[in-house]
Image (tube, rainbow, N blue to C red):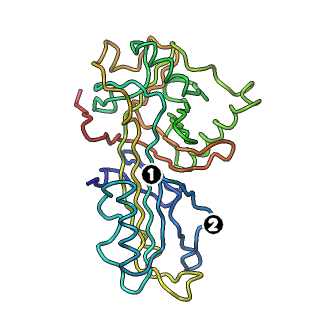
Amino acid sequence: MPTSSPATVLVPSLSAPISPGVNLIFSPDFPLEERDGKAVTVAHVPRGPWSVARVVQGGEPLLEMRQELERRFGAIPDGVLPESAPGDALGAYAFSFVRPSFASPFASQREGVFFGERVVPVFGLWKDVDDVTWARAAAQLRVHRHRGPDDFVIELEARGDERVVVARCPRPETLGAAVAEVVATVRRSRGWLRRWFGDKPFDWQCALRIPPLDLCAVRVDEELIGKPLADGDGRRIGDARHGVRFRLGDDALPPSEPGPIALGRGDVYERPFVCDGPFLVVVLGAPPQDELRLAAWIEAPVLPEGATADAP
């Protein structure tokens, strides 16, 4: 059964401050928010196969929600739902499992890059990837910015209408500041604006190395507990829980052995897109709406089960 990831916090809003050493996840799918002392229904909550959000009362609806989550996502993390309903009060619950996949898989390596004091695996593309894999996977990439190895924005086109935007940038004050700047960069390089703001395509002078991720976090919304539901005839919230799991890169090809430049940034590359320090991942829906489905600031990659990280 999945458990909450170490040093990983699910935050209630994009205004959350970024702190060194702490991973932040934001998902906009919780159905209620506290406003003027009441629990108010959120005007727009993204709906999709990756998420279930409900306000329930009683044991039977709670059991039905648990069964739906297990049917759609398998084992759910501890703490996402309580063992029993909160008496006669209402329970507000949401769980998302965001797991982008790619029509053409990327390559992977067991020992891919130094991240702080660890050597971590990666997925992506580099020069010793075979031509067929490289060509197919590279067609899913769009470069939005590359100012240097610590300042870039690149988009990975996933299945369906999902897009995964990965960025390295100076550590911002808040998660929202990072997301806003990156989404603005993506929009500037779209359509006719690309003539002025677009960057040249990903090519053989580029390298992409991203640590695979398996992040899991659960948050109890203490602010909502005890508050009356704004449109609920005085009924109060007795329990409020939000859980998110985010996996990225677990559908890459089987790992290859590390090559002679595997653990570096790849100085032989003209434009390295290498996540060897804190980075941002934003999952968006189709343009031009660019619906935000998840944002994560990664300070310490939490790897999928079976992936290894070693001290250098």
**Position of the N terminus by quadrant:** bottom left
Q: Position of residue 32 (x, y in %)?
A: 53, 70
Three-letter amino acid code of the residue under disc 2: Ala
* Residue drawn at point x = 27 percent, y = 18 percent: 257
Q: For the residue carrying disc 1, how many other residues have a C-alpha within 10 Å: few (<14), some (14-19), or many (20+)?
A: many
Q: Is residue 174 visible?
A: no
Instruction: Quickly name the residue at label 2.
Output: 43
Cβ–Cβ below 8 Å for labels 1 and 2? no
Residue under label 1, please give it: 25
Residue at image x 44%, y 11%? Answer: 268
Q: Quadrant of residue 200?
A: top right
Q: Is residue 36 above or below residue 244?
A: below
The tag earlier along the polypeptide, 1 or 2, is: 1
Kind of element beneath mark 1: strand
Q: Residue at x 40, y 60 (%)?
A: 243
Quarter placement of the C terminus: top left
Q: Nearer the viewer, residue 110 or 273?
A: 110
Point 31% across, 14% down: residue: 259
Image disc number at residue 108:
none
- Residue 75 shows up from this direction: yes
The image shows residue 83 at horizontal and vertical percentages of 29, 73
